[in-house]
Image (spheres, rainbow, N blue to C red):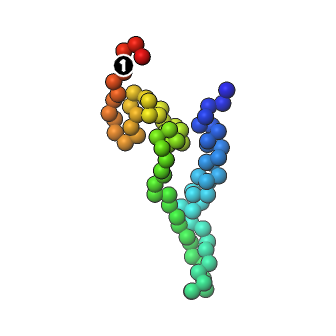
């Protein structure tokens, strides 16, 4: 059985490659100055619900012992659940 995150990674991989190329700079034409310049672009933030973000970031998810991706608050397990 293939884990879910492998399937998601196969769709995200082309986007990641293109974003990495944009951080290095892509030659772009400027019509005002009639010249080429290196265009740099960066992904600042990614948004999604907790299950989607945890899948993309290879995290445990919202029902894990430490569900938050920003802090280290630990959850409390209910006995016999």
Q: Which quadrant of the view contains residue 74?
A: top left
Residue at x 42% of width, y 16% of height: 81
Q: Is residue 2 above or below residue 46?
A: above
Count of numbered labels shown in the rendering: 1
Rendered image quadrant of residue 71: top left
* Viewer-proximal residue among 66 and 18: 66
Residue under label 1, please give it: 78
At x 44%, y 34%, the residue is 62
- Name the residue located 62 percent from the left edge and 31 percent from the top edge: 3
Q: Position of residue 72 (x, y in %)?
A: 34, 35
- Mark 1, secondary structure of its residue: loop
Residue 2 screen position, x and y as percent: 66, 30
Residue at the spot 59% in from the left edge and 37% down from the top edge = 5
Query: Among all residues in the image, which is located at the extreme bottom?
Result: 33
From this view, report whether residue 12 is shown above or below residue 51. Answer: below
> Which x, y percent locates residue 4?
61, 34
How far across and down, in percent of the image, does residue 70 sit? 37, 42
| Front residue of this view, candidates 36 and 67 | 67
Q: Quadrant of residue 67?
A: top left
Question: Is the N terminus in the top left, top right, bottom left or bottom right quadrant?
Answer: top right
Residue 57 visible in the current orientation:
no
Point out the residue furthest to the top here: 80
- Circle 1 crowding by C-alpha within 10 Å: few under 14, some 14–19, many from 20: few
Q: Is residue 8 above or below residue 3?
A: below
Q: Is residue 19 visible?
A: yes
């Amino acid at each position: 059985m293939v884990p879910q995150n492998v399937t998601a990674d196969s769709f995200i991989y082309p986007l990641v490659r293109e974003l990495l190329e944009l951080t290095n700079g892509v030659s772009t034409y400027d019509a005002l100055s009639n010249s080429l310049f290196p265009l740099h672009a960066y992904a600042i933030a990614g948004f999604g619900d907790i299950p989607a973000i945890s899948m993309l970031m290879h995290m445990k998810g919202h029902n894990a012992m430490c569900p938050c991706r920003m802090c280290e608050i630990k959850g409390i397990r209910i006995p016999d659940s």
